[in-house]
Amino acid sequence: MKTRIIFVDDEDLALRGLKRLLYPMRNEWDMEFVDSGAKALNLMATAPFDVIVSDMRMPGMNGAELLNEVMKRYPKTVRLILSGYADRELILKCVGSTHQYLAKPCDAEALKMTVRRAAELERSMKSDTLRQLITRCVVLPSVPALYSKMIEALQDPETDVETIAAIIERDGAMTAKILKLVNSAFFGLGHKIADPNEAVAYLGTETIKSLALCANAFSELEETTLPGFSVESLWEHCLVAARAAKMVAIHEDADRKLADEAYAAGLLHDLGKLVFAANLTEDYRQILNLAHEKKISLAAAEREVFGADHSDIGGFLLGLWGLPVPVVEAIALHHRPRTAAQKAFSPLTALHIGNVLASSIKLSVADMPASTLDLEYLHELGINSHLDSWQRAWRSEAIP
Ligand SMILES: [Fe+2]
Ligand SMILES: [Fe+2]
């Protein structure tokens, strides 16, 4: 079935330009072009669309308002904004309802790739409940203590980029949002950024300030009591896993880019757990009980209840947000690396190992359950014999 896409722009010239640009895609995509938000909504009421690409500045209903409405009425539709640089403030305001931003004038390749990837991801998520949850407005709240620290830091004119970055890095929700923003084609970087420090430096404190204080992109996690779940320990584990993953990458002589991607993947690899805990709290309570009673892994319990686990959901969300592909792949496959198409050392390999190292620094090879560390995968890559030296290196790094 062809992917159905609707393009909305009030300028006739821009619309005609898009039509011409995307003419070669007509065998793959079913495209409609309309010049107002109202017309888009009318058309969407007659048949479902997989993707909507809207201009930001339009008379009557602007792009942000349109996408908000689309989010409410058709949560399964992927929402992209096409916008000029002058709309920076407006852009920050719709960070919640937009999956990705594209820059004007439109680069055909970037648009094709973004739409294609978003549509593929949308189709790959088997569970309807989860797809709806993710494509709708998913809440990603922050650890209250870090949230307050962030707001305080942003209100202080003396605060430097390093301080902001250090706070962000300790909170997966903030890290994810910053990486979403910096990696959107809107900022016209041309390459993807995985390093949160670089992302903060690139965006600058002013943009992060508007994001946090004006656009309310960050929020606090409400106090919920989920037995055996703490968001603080979740991010602590992620930070340790990120360090371990980076260490493994460096140990394997990987380049800086791969090491950065392994680190970012580590910081966000269990983000799916927060998505569940903050958005489907009651179901997650059941899952935590189930894992405890049946003595199965949390991922296995999640799959039993939702038909997908936190790695699927984290990978899906961050993929939709346009994070670097190797980072998204590492997150999506961290519990089953063997299913990766590519059989070479990658951020996924580093994360898979780093995650296990982070869970215990005392394990010997014999202690590592096969379900935790995929020894066959490491064997396929020809690096299973390095296990001892990673452990030694990790021990000396973790326990100085
Ligand atoms: Fe995990
Ligand atoms: Fe983990």
Image (spheres, rainbow, N blue to C red):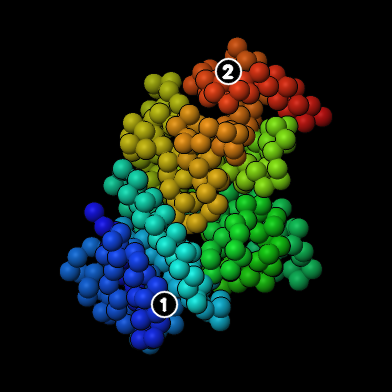
Q: Mark 2 to mark 1: distance in Å?
A: 52 Å
394 lies above or below 34: above
Identified at 67% across, 61% down, the residue is 200
Q: Which mark is residue 368?
A: 2
Query: Which amino acid, by three-letter code, is at mark 2?
Result: Met
Front residue (pair 319, 173): 319
Q: Nearer the viewer, residue 36 or 165?
A: 36
- For the point 45% across and 26% down, the residue is 297
- Position in image of residue 232 (x %, y %): 60, 42
Q: Secondary structure at mark 1?
A: strand
Tell me what residue is drawn at x 55 percent, y 52 percent.
324
Q: Quadrant of residue 76?
A: bottom left
Q: Would you identify the image quadrant in which residue 301 lies?
A: top left
In this view, 264 is above or below 251: below
> Looking at the picture, how far across and down is residue 181, in whole percent?
56, 63
Q: Amino acid at mark 1?
A: Asp
- Split into 4 quadrants, where in the image is the C terminus? top right
- Residue 55 bears which disc, if any? 1
Is 139 or 122 nearer to us in this picture? 122
For residue 49, which quarter of the picture?
A: bottom left
Mark in front: 2 vs 1:
1
Residues 209 and 8: in front is 8
Vertical order, 369 against 54 (above or below)? above
